[in-house]
Amino acid sequence: MTKAKKIINFLFSRVVIISLCILIQLAWWVFVFFYLTRVSNVVSLLVRAMGLLIVLWIANKKMNPSYK
């Protein structure tokens, strides 16, 4: 087996591919964490506004009050 073929077989082995996938996932989580810390105030405001709208919608529905 030639040296180039050994290197190609190693690069396409399960261990290398799984390790690369894990590194990509870790990089993605780090990116998401740092991005969300910058926009967390905006996200929090949007979630609160959405919650308020849902409460108002439920309160104004014509249904049995015991379900509300």
Image: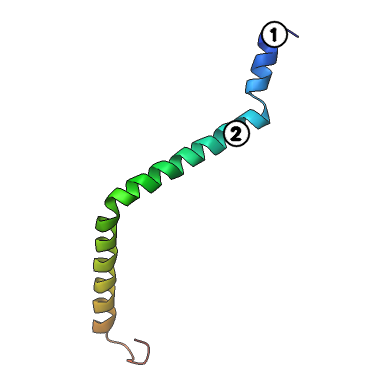
Residue 55 placement (x, y as % from top left): 28, 77
Q: Is residue 39 above or below residue 23?
A: below
Instruction: Give the image quarter of residue 42.
Output: bottom left
Q: Residue 36 location, x and y as percent?
A: 34, 50
Left or right: where 49 falls relative to 16: left
| Residue at 44 percent of width and 41 percent of height | 28
Dividing the picture into quadrants, the one containing residue 49 is bottom left
Q: Quadrant of the C terminus?
A: bottom left
Rendering colour mode: rainbow
The x, y position of residue 17, in whole percent, is 61, 30
Q: Which label number is shown at residue 3?
A: 1
Residue at 67% across, 26% down: 13
Residue for badge 2: 19
* Identity of the residue drawn at 37% across and 88% down: 67
Q: Nearer the viewer, residue 62 or 4?
A: 4
What amino acid is labelled 1 in the image?
A: Lys
